[in-house]
Image (tube, rainbow, N blue to C red):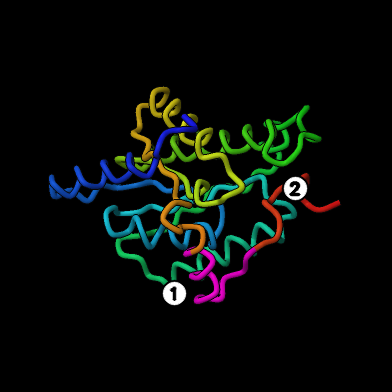
Amino acid sequence: MNKVNFQRITDAVIKELEAEGKRPVLLLHSCCGPCSSYVLEYLSQYFKIKLFFYNPNIYPEEEYRKRLSEQKKLLSLMQPADTEIIEGSYEPERFYECVKGFEHEPEGGKRCELCIRMRMEAAAQEAKRQKADYFATTLTVSPHKNAGYINEAGKELEGKLGIAYLVSDFKKRNGYKRSIELSREYNIYRQNYCGCVFSLDP
């Protein structure tokens, strides 16, 4: 799926929704405030958003609490229409079990794929519980994340769990650049490592 223009797929979905006069519910997994900033600005025009903060990979717990707090701060300042936050459980033991045996993989390798898949599956399951129409993740806004893998995982989960996945590549159309601008505008903390203990600089 790496050569697919994912933004065009997103555009087509949105165009169809607008033509039908629909504003569906989207369960949007968020990895952090900065990454969610542009995605919220963009998607809140077309969806009612349930923002799902589920990131058991984040280390240490103080960092997790800080990122969650910054996510809430961003929402209170941006006030995107029809948006609410859902706090997932902080369960680092689930992350460590998920990546067991891949602790020393390089960033962007198999360990990261397992972590992304774990969080996306939790998002898809939460979307079903919330009776959302779609689920998606903010992770594709990052230039350090593989949008092809993320979208492939999303479509597999769509088939497995029966909840529609919104294909995306939010870094397109200067999405990542816009996320940096919004983070500065709202004075949102931008972390210098992805989240897990293995991504910390040695």
Q: Is residue 90 left or right of residue 166?
A: right
The relative height of residue 34 versus residue 49 in the rendered view (above or below) is below
Seen at 45% across and 59% down, the residue is: 174
Marks 1 and 2 sit apart, C-alpha to C-alpha, by 29 Å
Q: From what the image shows, is residue 135 above or below residue 189?
A: above
- Which secondary structure class fits the magenta region best? helix
Pick whichever of labels 1 and 2 is earlier in the sequence.
1
Q: Secondary structure at mark 1?
A: helix
The extreme front residue here reads 3
Crowding at mark 2 (Cα within 10 Å: few <14, some 14-19, many 20+): some
- In the image, the segment drawn in magenta is 178-190
Q: Nearer the viewer, residue 169 or 159?
A: 169
Is residue 186 found inside the magenta-colored segment of the image?
yes
User: Which residue, given by chain and number where applicable, does mark 2 sit on?
Assistant: 199
- Residue visible at 30% across and 54% down in the picture: 48
The residue that appears at 62% across and 34% down in the rendered structure is 113
Q: Position of residue 16 (x, y in %)?
A: 19, 42
* Residue with the mark numbered 1: 77
